[in-house]
Each structure stands twice: as C-alpha cells, then as structure tokens.
C-alpha cells in the first residue's frame, strides 16, 4: 500500500497546477494519470491575466510568454462582415499585472507544467495509472481515503491518502464514485474544431473572431505562435463524423486560406456543455477543474476556472495539512469559487447564444439589434472579472475578495519581490512592530528598501481602501485591509474556523 497526504487524480492542466502548488509547499503528493502523454486533441487556446500570474508563481512565466500571443481584440461579426460587438483588449493591463487575454496551445503548457513537477521532491508522479474507486475511512481529522488504482498492465494497487482531489476531467471517476450530480444549464452544441500550423500569418486575422452566420456559425481565433484555430458549428441533422473528412475541411476553410497558407495539425468533433457539480467537497475528497464544472468555450474560461480552483484549494490544503487551519477552511473552497464559475459560465452561454443562432429570422433580428446598438455608440457588456463568493475574507473591509493588484516597475514584478505565501503589507515598519505570525510568509513596509520601487502603487492602494495595512492571501486575493494587528488576528481566527 502507498501512503500519501494528497492523491491528485488526473494530470491535465488543473491536476498538474495543483500538484506543483502543493509541491512548492512541501506537501507529500502522489499524482496519478491514466494516460502516458498529454491529451493530443484541440482544447484550450485562451487564458487570462490571472492565469499568467499563476504561471509566474510556478516559475513558468518566461516559457508561458514565449508560448503565447497577446490577443488584441475579440470581435463578433455578421455573415456579411459587419461588426456586431468588439472588445478591444490590446493596450490594457489587468489587475494581475499582465495584458488581459493570451492565446496558446494547451499541450505545450501541459508539458511545461509536468516538467516543473520534477523540481518538487515531495511530489511523485505515476503515469499510465488509473484511479478505479474510492472509499472513506474514519471521520473528522482522522479521516483517510483509500483509493484503488490500476497500472497500464492492469496490476491493482491501493493508495491511502489524507485527501484526494479529483482533477480527472469531465467524466470524473472521483465525482461518479461519490455519486455527485451536476447542475445542467442545458446549452450544448456539437462543433468541429481544427487547429492549424501557419505558413502565411500575414493572410490571417490578427483578432479573434466569431462569425455569427446562421448558415454556419464559425470561430476563427489565434493560438500560440505559429498556430491558428477554426471552429464550425454542426447544424441539426448534419452528420458530425462527415466533418472530419479532409475535403469537407478544405471546403470550410476556403473563405479563410489559400493553398499552402496552413497545415492541418489536429481536428476533432466535440460538444460543449454548461455544467456545475452540486458538491465540490465531501469529507476529504474534493473536485477541481472540469470534474467540478464545464463551460462553453466562447469566453475561453473553462481551463482558467479550473486553474483558479487549484490555486484556491492548494493554499487551504497546505494550512490544514500543517495543522494551522481547521478542516472547515476547505468549505470556503466551493463557497468562494462556485459563484465565480457560475458567473463566467452564464456569461459564456450568453455569448454562445448570440453566436449559435441558426434560424435566419432570429439572426436577422439579432444583427439589427447589435448594429443599432453600435450605431448609437453603446459598448458591449465588459468581460468583467466576476466576484468570488463569501469565504475566508475579512468581510466588510474594502476590496476584500478582490484580486490584489500586481505592479511592474522597470520590468520587475511585485510578486517576484514578495515571494510565495500570504503577505502583510503596511505603510510603515512601526505599524507591525513586534508582530509576527507563522501563517504569513512576508511582513513588510512600503517605506522599506524592498518595496520602495512599488511605493506609489501600494500607497495609492492603501489610500483607496483607507487603511494602514493589507493582508493578501497566498492566492493573491485580498483577505482584508485595516490595522496590521487586527488583520493578523483575523486571519488566524479565519483559518481556525472561529469568526473573525
Ligand atoms: C475545443 C475546446 C476549446 C476550449 N477552449 C478553452 C479556452 O480557450 N480557454 C479555457 O480556459 N478553456 C478552454 N477549454 C476547456 C479546457 O480545455 C478544459 O477546461 C481543461 O482541459 C480542463 O482541465 P482539467 O485538468 O480539469 O481536465 P482534463 O484536461 O480533462 O484532464 C483530466 C485528466 O485526468 C485524467 N484522468 C481521467 N480519469 C482518470 C482516472 N480515473 N485515473 C487517472 N487519471 C484520469 C485524464 O486522462 C486527463 O489527463 C476548451 C475545451 C475544448 C474542448
């Protein structure tokens, strides 16, 4: 029998991120993955600034930047090429410190995440190993989970772990073993997706496009350097398999490319879904990523939501396993994350309903509406960062639960100065004189040498919230703002599960 502290099931982007984040904290992890190599078919092409900050924290920023392209805009057009909606994204910097929108190739990123796991001596990875079933043993603090696994030769094994995190994707064995049902938004459509390598980038659009053509709703989006993606909706009554035929693909791509412009790299038929699991934690078993929720691709947020899950649960598990927090802290995982996931899923469905209109009359009404809106100068509903739900925050303090902004000065990013773990940042050293806490990795003053280059933005933040100090959680969400001592006391109380 293998004993571990956290069994991570599935090494997709979410499981690999989680295993890295736990490894950074020295947590003993066994990660099992059914396949021996990363998933080869087309999937995520977009991630946002918050996720770029996660790659930064994992030491993957240079790699991620090299493997991505910044998306300057996102445009919805009529079949005739008129603009219905346009999001200009190019020149802005999101609170996380990066441009808001990045295009990439998911397998490249997954390989980078897996390679990084070798840096963590407490993380063991077993590829070609499938979780078969789970059983809980004991209760409360003593609870353990026993997992049955099979290797690629069909040899069984048993793992006993303090916690199990199901990052095992849409068909999650972990979710099924617990009998957890999904809430279904009942919005799913079959699409063909084609990823291509580009020979002539100058002939391709340099913004992401949704062509709202009722005859064939189509997406045409950038990916990482040297790649482009097209997606075509398969209409009711059409045979999805026939869309994989190379002549059919050539016909669909004809309006976009000339001979030799691109080489088809991958193609697949998929059906998107809008689903949210009813429970994300039962005892010592938790769900993350597609195992807990799935979202249509129109806002490019499915994987991003899963990465946010991994970040949210990793620091909480670390505190619980080190005996610094009560297990009840883990209940804040779903309470914080689910409203955020639902808001993005609903936004994505709203976008999808605009794009997927196959009825000509309805589409004509849609076009007339959006064209009139544009003519009167209306701007589209912004791709806002939704709020997280209630949880491990100091309620009623300004900006609690928002992302703590990351400034960059002369190419140096704030997080790289402050490092991992929670931070207490105060105006002056005297604000925290005599205070220390094992729960907070960094206590520092704006007037000190390390933070002096960031004094302008940090002071502006504290002025805005009207406080002398701010406590930032390890996931870079603001715990609360106020007096340094009160913040440390409240953080400790929140982790212990007593009210702050
Ligand atoms: C066409 C398409 C476009 C998309 N575009 C975007 C986008 O632009 N942006 C975005 O953010 N998201 C996008 N997504 C969604 C994104 O790809 C997924 O949300 C993401 O891959 C989910 O990651 P995950 O790690 O939770 O699950 P997965 O990537 O599915 O990984 C789960 C892993 O678990 C393993 N596994 C399963 N069962 C077991 C078991 N019993 N034992 C051991 N291992 C197991 C699997 O082999 C797999 O490796 C898109 C998806 C599709 C299909």
Image: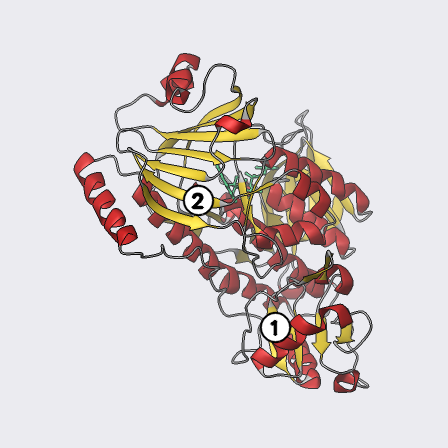
Q: Is mark 1 within 8 Å of ligand 1?
A: no
Q: Which numbered dot is residue 479?
A: 1
Residue 155, image x and y in percent? 69, 29
Gap in angstroms between the C-alphas marked 1 and 2? 33 Å
Residue drawn at (27%, 56%) of the image: 376
Instruction: Sort mark 1 into few (<14), some (14-19) or many (20+) by Cα contacts within 10 Å.
Output: many
Viewer can see residue 130: yes
Give the position of the N terminus as an image quadrant: top right
Q: Which numbered dot is residue 144?
A: none
The first of marks 1 and 2 along the sequence is 2
Residue drawn at (43%, 51%) of the image: 276
Q: Nearer the viewer, mark 1 or mark 2?
A: 2
Q: Ligand 1 is found in which quarter of the picture?
A: top right
Residue drawn at (31%, 29%) of the image: 216
Mark 2 residue element: strand
Mark 1 residue element: strand
Residue 134, image x and y in percent? 59, 45
Give the position of the C terminus as an image quadrant: bottom right
Q: Of 79 and 417, which appears nearest the observer?
A: 79
* Residue 134 position (above or below residue 191): below
Residue identifier under label 2:
74
């Amino acid at each position: 029998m293998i004993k571990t502290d956290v069994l991570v099931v599935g090494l997709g982007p979410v499981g690999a991120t989680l295993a890295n984040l736990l490894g950074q904290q020295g947590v003993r992890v066994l990660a099992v993955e059914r396949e021996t190599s990363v998933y080869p078919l087309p999937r995520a092409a977009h991630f946002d600034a918050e996720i770029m900050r996660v790659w930064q924290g994992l030491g993957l920023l240079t790699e991620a930047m090299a493997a991505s392209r910044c998306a300057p805009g996102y445009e919805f057009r009529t079949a005739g090429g008129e603009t219905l909606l346009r999001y200009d994204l190019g020149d802005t910097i999101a609170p996380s410190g990066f441009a808001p929108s990045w295009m990439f190739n998911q397998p490249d990123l997954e390989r980078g995440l897996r390679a990084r796991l070798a840096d963590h001596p407490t993380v063991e990875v077993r590829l070609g190993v499938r979780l078969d079933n789970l059983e809980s043993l004991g209760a409360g603090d003593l609870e353990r989970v026993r997992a049955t696994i099979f290797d690629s030769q069909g040899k069984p094994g048993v793992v006993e772990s303090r916690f199990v995190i199901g990052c095992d994707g849409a068909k999650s064995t972990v979710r099924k073993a617990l009998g957890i049902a999904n809430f279904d938004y009942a919005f799913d459509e079959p699409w063909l997706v084609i990823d291509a390598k580009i020979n002539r980038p100058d002939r391709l659009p340099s913004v992401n496009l949704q062509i709202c053509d009722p005859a064939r709703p189509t997406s045409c989006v950038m990916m990482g350097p040297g790649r482009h993606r097209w997606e075509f909706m398969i209409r009711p009554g059409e045979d999805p398999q026939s869309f994989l035929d190379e002549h059919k693909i050539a016909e669909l791509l004809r309006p976009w490319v000339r001979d030799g412009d691109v080489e088809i790299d991958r193609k697949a038929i998929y059906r998107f879904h809008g689903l949210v699991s009813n429970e994300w934690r039962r005892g010592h078993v938790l769900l993350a990523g597609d195992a807990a929720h799935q979202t249509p691709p129109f806002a490019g947020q499915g994987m991003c939501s899963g990465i946010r899950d991994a970040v949210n649960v990793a620091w909480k598990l670390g505190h619980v396993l080190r005996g610094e927090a009560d297990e009840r802290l883990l209940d804040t995982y779903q309470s914080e994350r689910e409203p955020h996931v639902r808001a993005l899923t609903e936004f994505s469905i709203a976008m999808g309903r605009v794009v997927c209109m196959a009825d000509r009359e309805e589409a004509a009404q849609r076009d007339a509406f959006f064209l009139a809106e544009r003519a009167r100068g209306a701007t589209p509903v912004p791709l806002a960062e939704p709020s997280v739900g209630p949880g491990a925050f100091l309620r009623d303090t300004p900006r609690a639960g928002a992302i703590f902004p990351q400034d960059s000065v002369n190419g140096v990013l704030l997080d790289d100065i402050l490092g991992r773990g929670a931070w207490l940042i105060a105006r002056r050293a005297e604000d925290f004189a005599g205070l220390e806490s094992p729960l907070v990795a960094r206590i520092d003053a704006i007037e000190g040498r390390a933070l002096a280059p960031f004094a302008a933005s940090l002071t502006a933040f504290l002025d805005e919230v009207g406080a002398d100090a701010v406590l930032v959680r390890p996931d870079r969400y603001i715990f609360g703002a106020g007096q340094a001592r009160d913040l440390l006391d409240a953080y400790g109380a929140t982790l212990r599960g007593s009210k702050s």
